[in-house]
Amino acid sequence: MEDLIKELKELEELVIRCMKCGTCQAHCPLYKKDFFEQSVARGKISMIESVYEGNLEDASRILKYIDYCLMCGRCKNNCPSGVKTDEIFLRAKSALRKVEKLPSWGTFVLKIVMEKPELLSKLSPLMHMGLKFGSKQVKADVFKPLFGLYSRNVASIAKKSFSDAYAGFHKAENEKFSVIFYPGCAVNYIYKHWGETIVKLLNKLDVSVYVPDVNKCCGIPAATLGDMQLYAKMVNENRQLFKNFDADYVITCCPTCAYGLFDMGEKVAEETFDKIEMDILVFLKEVIGLSPKQLTLEKIALHIPCHYDHSKDTFLKDLIKGISDNFYELKDQSCCGFGGTFNIKNYNSSKQIVKNKSEEIKTAEVEKLFTPCPGCAMQLTDGIIREGGEAEVLHPVELIYRGLIDSECFRR
Amino acid sequence: MKKSMYKKFQKIAGKKNCFVNPEELSGYCFDAFAKSNAFPEIVVAPESPECIPEIITLCNEENLAIVTRGAGTNLSGGTLPFDGSCVLLTTKLNKIKEINKADHYAVVEAGVVTADIANAAASAGLFYPPDPGSMNISTIGGNVAENAGGLRGLKYGVTKDYLMGLTLFDAEANKVIGGGRTVKQVTGFNLPGLFAGSEGLLGIMAEFILKLIPPPESSKSMLVTYNDILKACDTVSQIIAANILPATMELMDNFTIRTVEEATEIGLPVDADALLLLEIDGHHGQVEDEFDKVKSICKKNNGHLKIAEDEDSKNKIWEARRKALSSLARLKPTLILEDATVPRSKISSMMSSIMDISRKYEITIGTFGHAGDGNLHPTILTDKRDKDEMLRVEKAVDDIFSVALSLGGTLSGEHGIGTAKSKYLEMEYGSGTVKFMKNLKRGVDIKNVLNPGKMGL
């Protein structure tokens, strides 16, 4: 226990910057639902302080509250004092996990998903079958499991993972750039077609693509479950792996993976990184110079993922606005409520958070909802179905690729 | 807390709205002024105002004092709990019950966030002017309890000027109604006036009737740069002496300008000794007319005036002001935000005294604030772990208060007294006044159960 208090005390330099102004309340999706201090950054920071100030006897009991967090980063992004809440909470959880054991599902995630990606890859045909027979189909490619407590509407799991199907070098005919594409677990097993589309699209645009043989998890689930060592290991293994390829860029399509590997990743990285990391859409715009226009007449909307590089928000909005003249700007700009491991632990809260946005999407009769994040896509698909909405949830590359093919046909 | 007592609270407010675990209680041992080592016995968050009298009765039976708390953003320690207290959280009393367009008022529960009221009024084509810095977070109950101000105080007044009526529960759990829906109302004591700034000492407020007004037709924002801050202060006094009431007149000193620019890269003139940010609003003709006069006063004081031509540059000006406190906060671990206020003609003397005090005690003070209503915010940047510096900071604060009072000013323009300034109350008003306030408090709260000890009462 003394070690634990010492470790929490080490956070003081970060914690002391919090002046308890409460600005985080206005941005925290959980506070806006609960209206309690223990849901929001300021209250959690006070708990950590209270431990090392000697006002809380059983320090381990604060884990439950620190853990009740989407890690959406809104408190950090909007904090007037620049408090690094994400770092504080990840480090606090890591300290607290040393005294509080993980639940068994957490151990499973860490052992199998992190350390045995090959095994998980082999399991995916089984999971595919399980989902096909143990669930009812609610929409094309969306299923609702019939058993278990977890009643989320889920996209189907691919028979063969993306990495298994696409590992290797995909050379473009007139190669101008070469890049590494890092799919991340959600694209590897579930949104496999995003990965396929990105490889094909890049090839068409004269970009050669390396796909690593095995998709190693970015480590974020380990960090959020309080295993910072394993997180650091995953970050460093991935960055080491990228080094082996003769490419200038690492392309991602999951903002949370990008955050884990490169943004927060910098904190645990052993070496500096020699390549440029870019989200696929930013790469298309800034490196290739692609500005797709008028790809559909349908009513479209955009959900900006929490971990998207927010200096690119305006660019992202302009890109989506360009795709259709019928753009609807969502009033609800909140987090979707997915939060990775959060939604496994707190599915009811997670559902409540996505409800308002899903209702808005339904009422506004949005036909296509774009979001460049597989986690958000999963959550919004579930939320929209729950509210009885019709909107299809897509990554923008899906339409951009189709548009490119169509325009080529037209030119011919 | 005894289990039987806890159960009684749960029965009133619901299981999920009562907290007694120390971890949970630690989330309520602070406000934006300070953190205390004492935890309350229980935190209870009623979902309906009807629960409030039951909670009061139970607290009376169990000898618990009641600390009413909204968003906990106040800057004077008014919501700090203590041993043997019950924190009554109003954040779940958050219904906007009515926006009346015909009679220009709103009826809201105590836990509604201020900005939500302003937005609801705007959607109905009306205007709720009080705009305290924390309006996106603070609750209206807290605004009334502290009589919160904001940037528009100069022309539009503060929270009390918009409080038409209220419903509250007293220390004996009686329902008390003050004011109402009419513009004129003199039935009995002016209870809304008494409760604005009452800091939770006289009753627990549950519902308010707020005045809304027609919004101004047009507005003009401008930024004036000075190479002498005292000239900027003179400009403020002269504009007011010329019978012009801008909606806002905000001042930033050089230290604040440089800090904001470093943090935001808005494009502020970092060489300027001071900046004035002004907004004039009203009818088109009036705005043009007043603008000409303001321009010539600025020129006379060697101020360089730049007008915001479009919405974008207008937003940039106000973004610069809104970011002042936050940008300063990033520099040092501890920030002490002062609130002493002087008559507007004395702004320039106050400013030069602040600069003297900063030099005398060798501490960093960034000053910005609502120059137009004499409400400057000298902001001391320090580190609470540095004991030696904290002693000097304390002396500097004492000096700031003395100067403000000697200039005919007040301890607090908009942040309240709470625990932070209770020891100075007598300095401003004398012992007779403190005794009167004590008698008033004891009169309506014989056992002193409502936020006891705050304001020194």
Image (tube, coloured by chain):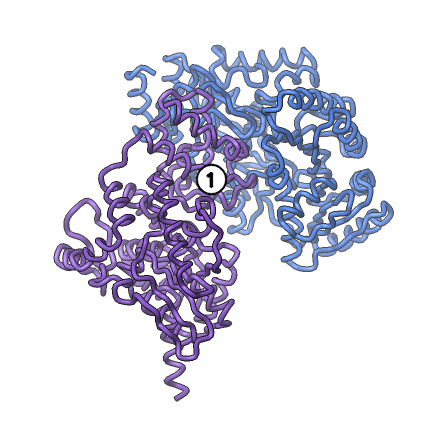
Chain colours: A purple, B blue
User: Which residue shows up at 41% across the image and 74% down it?
Assistant: A295
Circle 1 packing at 10 Å, graded few (<14), some (14-19), many (20+), is many
Q: Residue furthest front?
A: A244
Q: What's the residue type where badge 1 is placed?
A: Thr
User: Which residue shows up at 62% across the image and 41% down it?
Assistant: B327
Q: Chain of mark 1?
A: A
Q: Nearer the viewer, residue B450 or B406?
A: B406
Q: Quadrant of residue B432?
A: top right
Instruction: Classify mark 1: helix, strand or loop.
Output: helix
Q: Is residue B356 left or right of residue B125?
A: right
Residue A311 at x, y percent in the picture:
53, 56
Q: Is residue B428 left or right of residue B115?
A: right
Q: Nearer the viewer, residue A361 or B430?
A: A361
Would residue B397 be visible to someone looking at this image? yes
Image quadrant holding the N terminus of chain B, namely top left
The residue identified by callout 1 is: A85
Number of dots carrying numbers:
1
Q: Is residue B354 above or below residue A87?
A: above
Image quadrant holding the C terminus of chain B, namely top right
Q: Is residue A268 above or below residue B334?
A: below
Residue B137 at x, y percent in the picture:
51, 39
Q: Residue furthest right?
A: B300
Q: Quadrant of residue A404?
A: bottom left
